[in-house]
Image: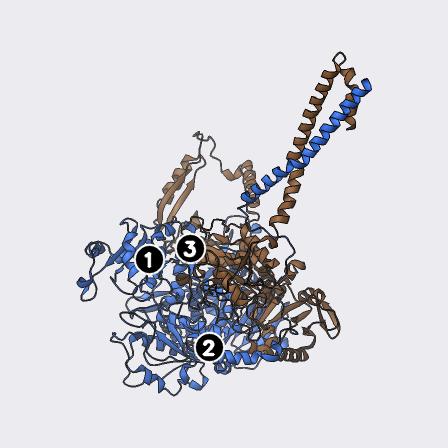
Chain colours: A brown, B blue
């Protein structure tokens, strides 16, 4: 405002002979245009971008704005899961079709808040943070499609990770109300904590027709091999605690038990083991003197001494993962994160992702009955193997346990592998950490299977403009009876025959060039793939005192 | 007036500004709502809104205070409940198998004595004799962990001539039957026309099934074993090798995909084969069916039959099998078919079209590495699917077919042993094989998990794991003559071996009847010398897996071997490149004697060799374990009685495992003479029987292995620059040449 007043006062000086009426007119016009321009510019770029996004998050990003859906009492309930379901009977493969990328398409239902007739929600907790993370990760991935007609797999947005917070009947009805439910065909449910007191079923109790179940804590009797996917129980500590990777090797304790809810029977047996083996075992329990809440999750005690959990796990070579009320335990994830070798004692438990992961290389599975023999069993494992298992355990955690995203992606990849088995990930891809992948040999050409019983070989001759020696090589080689084919690579682009036929190896620039080549290639490979050996293959009787004419390859020594 | 005007202007501008600001407040309104709705429509790529409001955490911890399972359910009770509830079709090892029977004596298998008057098919006879000849066999049912019936259960098709009647009562009357607990029942065919059920026609109780064509619905995971369907001509031992002779690049063969077989016009399993003609193109996809089978095929024949039959006659099955990249294996009446093993052996990658078939040994074999698993519902996509498979992958699939064929399927013996090993892995959970042991060379039958559960302890997985063998060796010297003079060759040998930079320790195995010499009689060396007194003083004890052998490599030596330090060093560096083979000095060869129709043995200097004598050889210590635990006692006792042939047996074993020849390294010229010249040795080698015995051994061994595992080699490994015309000072292993 100040500026315009100044402007106005200067007006007469700038336009000296103009009449006041006109002057006023022009000045007003000018200021209007100017201010108009400024205003438009400001509205266009600055204020609304902040305003609208603020409104977006308030408006659309809250779970409370999801539409409310009332479930009528009489709404149909799906059948209990069918134990005989397999991919070829309960899964509609036509929906996935043939696609050149060999990748299934996954659709996520938009969030709805289901309530029963009187308005009580079907779940006491609603959407959990973990399920939100999982669905977010899937929607960001290559698997995701928003086109429901192109989808091969459907994921309900109803959170069934924890059965304890669900009303079973209403949840089932809510599932059946999904627009594409169709007897649960091609629907995937994620559940980590199945069953409830007192008998704790090992699979989700919610009736679910033919839906696939990605469950944590399957037993061999509820797991439909090749149909369900066994997933880990996610530990929130994975995100909260940052445990740096430790070098594999011997640790302060040999065996550590850190679970708090171990059944009395087993605790007694563990204590007996502790008496027999003393310091090698550390047997922790919850802290009775600490207040409840977060602190108690992160602390463990032994005889009044307080230990930080999960950090203490890094101090032990082996960590016990006993079954609790459920077979799947979140402790497994913490133990792997700490690079401690899990000793899993949960009879009939289907280990997480056991369809693709080779748990023999990362864990020790002991029948519950043999708990008293645990110490002797573990002692018999060679050192080098323990180190390898520690490394493998940590790697399993990083690749498959560390986040809900990792768990979700692995589950989808496993289902994807079943639908496109010819493009499935290999054992090596699933189980070998990248360090090993690089240093090991996996090319099909190098499979140590059969010595080739080939009838002959192909000779490849590279020419360096030396026609005479080329002809000589060709005449010599063509005498060989096992020659199948001779291939000449003509490297002479200028077609000018060289004047000197000196040995190439005497040419110094040539050697320098070749050294450069080697360095260049090594940098491309990232390492030097060539290996040095001190031996050379010769014919059996090479240069032996033996009649030359009886030798199979008499000429070789005389060349 | 001037001031008035000035006020007016300022007022006007002020008014305008106010106006504009007022609009400013209003104008963005609609603009923002517009953009929001635009956002709403523009976000379909992320319709899951990544909710950011504070959501509840999942709490996965068991709360012993709140959840009262501690009071109610004892895990021990729960186990008991499980084992009483899950029976019959829901049997698992935990509920239907008595592990306690296996704890006392390990995994032993008892075969019921054959009853008089019971006829047994040739295939079942082969199965039984394989078990009886295996190291698992026990004749004492009190020691057994697993029981196998002597009643033929292979063919349970009522229309078949092999069908055994009244099996139910016969089985029930067996005194040890115990409702089938810890029993294993072999079956190839079950059910009959028209529905071909998988029922065996008698109550199997809690017995395990080793069954062909088993479906995933009926398969009890980790309890049953799926075995391949094999014909009655399938060889008992040995068996033919795979047909793949060499790799071709690019790997494509004349045909892309072939099939030739019967077509069932109606009934169970007929749909897929009836639809094959849709995919047939008579060029590179050749799928042929015939209606001509059975007595009254004319009655059912459809419009296509005559055309199909004519086309069928045009092609030769074997020609197609050997010249096709992929072979279709569609289900027949039952899920499995003979085509599967035929394709596998012919290195024709099987394309499975048999929904719900639990593939053979699926518990341990990763079939995705050797077969293409198709879906009957997607038959029309099969050609484009196989065409989309990359060349590298085809090469890998093809080689894996050969590995699997030779490791697990080529003979009845292999099929049966694989079945038993799978069950053993379940029983002795701690010492079981990892997936890698089953699916990579040399396969589960040669990789014994009792030796070690760590892959790096075996000679086969160094490349896979990206590690190297331990850079030291342990020398094992087999001593048979008493120590009387200080000039004995054994003392020279000790000194020169101990001087090697790679030597970790020396073990002297005292197999001499005279008592051990005093400690001071042994020369002082920089490495420890351990003297072990052989227990029975038998030949095989030199291949005992002694605990004191700590390194991966073993240098096996006779007491009169003459070796220089350089030679030892060089042989060891060679072994590091070939840790799964025998690397050594004196070599021998085998040949087929046409006149006598038997294998011959020769020690002549020839252009090739197939054995390296273990009197001076380096190999992996795992072979000590294999020699002691894998070979049958019949062969070992033969060696002990003759006090001969132990080296031949070792060479047979290693070549059977690796399918490769041993490696001979440079030897000094005089080697042969010095060796023969030794007085002590001369007695053994001069014995005319000695040579004849070795011939006999070879033939005995070959018959147990079911074929000749030895492979000839024409290669000798010399140091680089060996006998080259360069200054001796530039050579690393000078000694070898000088001598």
Give the chain letter at badge 2: B
Q: Are marks 1 and 2 on the same chain?
A: yes
Instruction: Specify few, some or many for label 1: CA neighbours under 10 Å numbering under 14, 14-19, or 20 or more.
Output: many
Which residue is more in the foreground, A557 or A153?
A153
Under tag 1, what secondary structure? strand
Distance of mark 2 from mark 3, alpha carbons?
Answer: 35 Å
Decide if residue A323 is on the left or right side of residue A229. Answer: right
Q: Is residue B387 visible?
A: yes
Marks 1 and 2 close (CB-CB < 8 Å): no
- Please name the residue that numbered disc 2 is placed on: B86
Host chain of mark 3: A
Q: Nearer the viewer, mark 2 or mark 3?
A: 2
- Which mark is in front, 1 or 2? 2
The CA distance from mark 3 to mark 1 is 14 Å
Residue ID at (29%, 76%): B121
Q: Nearer the viewer, residue B182 or A261?
A: A261
Q: Where residue B32 sits: x, y (%)?
A: 62, 39
Q: Residue furthest top?
A: A17
Which residue position is annotated with label 3? A422
Vertically, is B78 above or below B415? below
Tell me the crowding category of disc 2: few under 14, some 14 to 19, or many 20 or more residues within 10 angstroms, Cα based. Answer: some
């Amino acid at each position: 405002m100040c500026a315009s007043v100044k402007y106005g006062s200067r007006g007469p000086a700038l336009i000296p002979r103009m009449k006041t009426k006109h002057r006023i007119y022009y000045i007003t016009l000018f200021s209007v245009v100017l201010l108009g321009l400024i205003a438009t510019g400001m509205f266009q770029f600055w204020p609304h971008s902040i305003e609208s996004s603020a409104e977006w998050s308030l408006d659309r990003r809250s779970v409370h704005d999801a539409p409310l859906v009332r479930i009528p009492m009489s709404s149909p309930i799906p059948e209990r899961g069918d134990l005989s379901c397999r991919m070829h009977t309960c899964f509609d493969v036509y929906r996935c079709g043939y696609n050149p990328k060999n990748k299934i398409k996954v659709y996520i239902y938009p969030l709805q808040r289901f309530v029963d007739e009187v308005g009580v929600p079907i779940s006491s907790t609603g959407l959990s943070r973990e399920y939100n993370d999982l669905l977010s990760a899937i929607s960001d991935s290559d698997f995701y499609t928003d086109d429901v007609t192109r989808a091969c797999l459907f994921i309900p947005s109803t959170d069934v990770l924890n059965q304890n917070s669900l009303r079973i009947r209403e949840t089932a009805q809510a599932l059946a109300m999904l627009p594409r439910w169709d007897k649960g065909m091609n629907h995937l449910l994620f559940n980590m904590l199945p069953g409830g007191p007192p008998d704790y079923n090992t699979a989700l109790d919610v009736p679910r027709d033919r839906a696939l179940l990605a469950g944590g804590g399957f037993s061999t009797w509820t797991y439909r091999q090749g149909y369900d996917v066994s997933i880990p129980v996610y530990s929130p500590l994975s995100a909260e605690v940052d445990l740096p990777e430790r070098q594999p090797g011997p640790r302060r304790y040999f065996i550590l038990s850190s679970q708090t809810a171990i059944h009395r029977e087993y605790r007694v047996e563990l204590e007996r083991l502790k008496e027999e083996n003393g310091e090698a075992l550390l047997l922790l329990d919850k802290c009775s003197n600490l207040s409840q809440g977060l602190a108690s999750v992160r602390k463990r005690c032994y005889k009044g001494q307080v230990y930080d959990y999960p950090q203490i796990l890094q101090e032990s070579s082996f960590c016990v993962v006993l079954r609790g009320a459920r077979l799947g335990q979140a402790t497994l994830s913490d133990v792997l994160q700490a690079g401690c070798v899990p000793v899993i004692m949960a009879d009939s438990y289907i280990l997480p992702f056991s369809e693709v992961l080779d748990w023999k290389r990362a864990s020790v599975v002991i029948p519950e009955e043999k708990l008293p023999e645990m110490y002797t069993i573990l002692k018999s494992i060679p050192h080098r193997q323990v180190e390898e298992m520690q490394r493998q355990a940590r790697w399993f955690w990083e690749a498959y346990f560390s986040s809900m995203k990792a768990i979700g992606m692995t589950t989808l990849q496993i289902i994807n592998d079943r639908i496109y088995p010819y493009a499935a990930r290999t054992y090596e891809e699933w189980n070998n950490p990248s360090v090993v992948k690089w240093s090991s040999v996996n090319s099909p050409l190098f499979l140590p299977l059969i010595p080739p019983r080939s009838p002959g070989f192909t000779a490849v001759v590279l020419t360096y403009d030396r026609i005479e020696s080329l002809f000589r090589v060709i005449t010599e080689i063509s005498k060989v009876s096992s020659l199948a084919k001779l291939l000449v690579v003509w490297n002479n682009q200028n077609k000018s025959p060289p004047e000197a036929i000196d040995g190439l190896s005497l040419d110094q620039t040539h050697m320098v060039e070749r050294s450069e080549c080697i360095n260049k290639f090594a940098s491309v490979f990232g390492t030097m793939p060539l290996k040095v050996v001190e031996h050379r293959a010769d014919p059996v009787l090479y240069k032996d005192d033996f009649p030359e004419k009886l030798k199979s390859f008499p000429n070789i020594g005389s060349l | 007036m001037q001031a008035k005007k000035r006020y007016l202007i300022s007022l006007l501008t002020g008014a305008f500004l106010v106006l504009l600001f007022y609009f400013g407040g209003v104008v963005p309104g609609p603009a923002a709502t517009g953009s929001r709705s635009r956002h709403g429509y523009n976000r379909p790529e992320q319709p899951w809104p990544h909710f950011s409001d504070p959501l509840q955490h999942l709490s996965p911890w068991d709360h012993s205070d709140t959840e009262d399972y501690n009071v109610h359910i004892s895990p021990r009770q729960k186990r008991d409940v499980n084992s009483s509830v899950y029976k019959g079709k829901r049997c698992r090892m935990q509920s239907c198998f008595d592990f306690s029977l296996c704890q006392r004596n390990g995994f032993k298998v008892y075969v019921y004595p054959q009853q008089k008057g019971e006829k047994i098919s040739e295939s079942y006879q082969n199965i039984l004799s394989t078990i009886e000849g295996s190291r698992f066999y026990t004749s004492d049912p009190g020691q057994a962990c697993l029981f196998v019936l002597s009643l033929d259960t292979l063919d349970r098709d009522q229309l078949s001539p092999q069908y055994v009647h009244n099996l139910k009562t016969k089985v029930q009357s067996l005194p040890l039957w115990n409702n089938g607990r810890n029993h294993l029942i072999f079956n190839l065919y079950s059910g009959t026309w028209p529905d071909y059920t998988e029922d065996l026609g008698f109550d199997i109780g809690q017995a395990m099934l080793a069954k062909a064509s088993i479906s995933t619905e009926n398969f009890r995971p980790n309890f049953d074993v799926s075995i391949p369907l094999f014909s009655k001509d399938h060889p008992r031992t040995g068996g033919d090798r795979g047909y793949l002779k060499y790799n071709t690049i690019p790997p494509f063969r004349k045909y892309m995909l072939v099939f030739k077989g019967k077509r069932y016009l109606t009934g169970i399993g007929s749909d897929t084969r009836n639809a094959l003609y849709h995919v047939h193109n008579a060029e590179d996809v050749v799928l042929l069916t015939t209606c001509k089978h059975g007595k009254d095929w004319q009655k059912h024949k459809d419009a296509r039959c005559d055309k199909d039959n004519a086309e069928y006659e045009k092609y030769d099955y074997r020609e197609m099998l050997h010249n096709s990249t992929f072979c279709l294996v569609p289900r027949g009446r039952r899920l499995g078919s003979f085509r599967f093993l035929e394709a596998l052996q012919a290195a024709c990658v099987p394309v499975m079209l048999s929904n719900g078939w639990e593939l053979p040994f699926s518990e341990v074999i990763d079939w995705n590495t050797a077969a293409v698993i198709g879906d009957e519902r997607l038959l029309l996509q099969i050609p484009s699917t196989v065409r989309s498979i990359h060349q590298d992958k085809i090469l890998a699939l093809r080689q894996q077919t050969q590995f699997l064929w030779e490791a697990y399927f080529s003979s009845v013996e292999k099929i049966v042993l694989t079945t038993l090993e799978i069950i053993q892995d379940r029983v002795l959970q701690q010492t079981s094989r990892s997936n890698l042991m089953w699916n990579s060379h040399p396969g589960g039958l040669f990789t014994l998990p009792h030796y070690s559960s760590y892959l790096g302890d075996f000679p086969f997985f160094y490349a896979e794991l990206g590690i190297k063998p331990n850079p030291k060796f342990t020398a094992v010297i087999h001593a048979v003559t008493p120590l009387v003079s200080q000039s004995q060759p054994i003392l020279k040998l000790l000194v020169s071996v101990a001087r090697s930079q790679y030597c970790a320790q020396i073990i002297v195995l005292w197999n001499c009847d005279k008592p051990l010499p005093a400690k001071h009689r042994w020369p002082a060396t920089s490495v420890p010398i351990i003297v072990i007194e052989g227990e029975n003083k038998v030949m095989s004890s030199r291949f005992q897996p002694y605990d004191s052998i700590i390194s991966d490599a073993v240098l096996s030596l006779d007491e009169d071997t003459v070796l220089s330090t350089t030679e030892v060093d060089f042989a060891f560096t060679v072994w590091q490149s070939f840790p799964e083979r025998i690397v050594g000095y004196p070599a021998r060869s085998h040949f087929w004697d046409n006149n006598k129709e038997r294998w011959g043995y020769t020690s002549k200097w020839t252009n090739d060799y197939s054995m390296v004598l273990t009197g001076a050889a380096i190999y992996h210590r795992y072979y000590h374990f294999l020699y002691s635990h894998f070979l049958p006692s019949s062969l070992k006792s033969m060696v002990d009685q003759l006090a001969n042939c132990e080296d031949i047996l070792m060479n047979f074993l290693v070549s059977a495992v690796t399918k490769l020849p041993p490696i001979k390294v440079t030897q000094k010229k005089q080697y042969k003479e010095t060796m023969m010249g030794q007085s002590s040795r001369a007695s053994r080698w001069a014995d005319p029987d000695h040579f004849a015995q070795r011939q006999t051994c070879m033939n005995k061994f070959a018959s147990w292995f079911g074929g000749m595992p030895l492979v000839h080699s024409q290669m000798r490994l010399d140091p680089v620059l060996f006998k080259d015309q360069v200054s001796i000072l530039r050579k690393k292993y000078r000694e070898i040449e000088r001598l």
